[in-house]
Amino acid sequence: MNPPRDNPAPGPGHAPDSAGAIAIILARAGSKGVPGKNTAPLAGRPCVAWTIEHAQQTPGIARVVVSTDDPRVAEISRTMRAQVVARPADLAGDTATIDDAARHALTQLGNTHAAPIVILYANVPVRPRDLSRRALDRFAESGADSVQSFCRVGKHHPWWMVRVEDGGRLAPWQGDTLFHNVYRRQLLPPAFVPDGGVMVVSRRALFREIPGVADGPHAFLGLDRRAIETTEGDVVDIDTPTDLLVAGATLASRHPALEKSA
């Protein structure tokens, strides 16, 4: 069973492995879906400020670093006393990978010790207050190469996925039976999708120093990959204008005083 949400007290896994973790917040300027989303105002604060505050208030995180090519994000970060690493253009385009950006940031810090690395997206302003702490706890307790947050899917379940063929004919996405013959959501087996809330990785995993890991976009997560679970609405990842509205409404409901003072 997961610890209760929004409980800021440190868990048993913090000492010694998760003490001194480094949070790297990724905040590139370019976004085609929602331009300027990392600095968009949400409940009285720029979007990125919510992630910086989350990292700063997480027990076990000793250093908060923002990797960005956006001058406005850099200004906000410094105002909040987060360290800024200037991201070069070749790591800020549409084809740049998160692990390349995280490796660059860590290298710029001149840091070679084995502290856990907490990777956070600047465009995720809504996440449980204890989410990164729970990920650090699982990382320390399990000895895994990485821990990532996953949300249980509801009606968008893989068993209910289909192909739409010529003439609008339906075919199962997999197998021979539409919807696996399941027509009630309660009968679907548990399935999960990464929600973007948090990733914790070891330095060896991030730098691909673990033998036997197959090459690919997720190789930086290592061999032993673990999960922590969130529920629907716990995490809001801004990819569309609608996500901005949902995030703003969620934060305003949780922090009404900030919204009124904006």
Image (cartoon, helix red, strand yellow):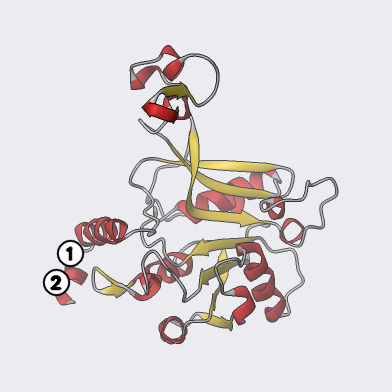
Residue at image position (71%, 46%) is 143
Q: Amino acid at mark 1?
A: Pro
Residue 41, placed above or below residue 127: below
Q: Position of residue 5 (x, y in %)?
A: 39, 46
224 is higher (above) or lower (below) than 181: below
Measured from the top left, where is residue 172 in percent x and y? 48, 22
Which residue sits furthest front?
167
Quadrant in the rendering for residue 142? top right
The residue identified by callout 1 is 256
Q: Residue at x 39, y 17 (%)?
A: 187
SS assignment at label 1: helix
Q: Kindly check if marks 1 and 2 are in contact, taking CB atoms under 8 A apart as contact.
A: yes
Which is more toward the observer, 84 or 8? 84
Count of numbered circles on the image = 2
Residue occupying the point 42% across, 25% down: 160
Instruction: Name the one closer to the observer, 243 or 260.
Output: 243
Distance, label 1 to label 2, CA atoms, is: 6 Å
Relative placement, left or right, of 57 versus 15 is: left
State whether residue 228 is above or below residue 85: above
- Residue at the spot 44% in from the left edge and 69% down from the top edge: 31
Q: Is residue 217 above or below residue 180?
A: below
Reading the image, the residue beneath label 2 is 260
Residue 10 seen by the camera:
no
Residue kind at label 2, given as amino acid type: Lys
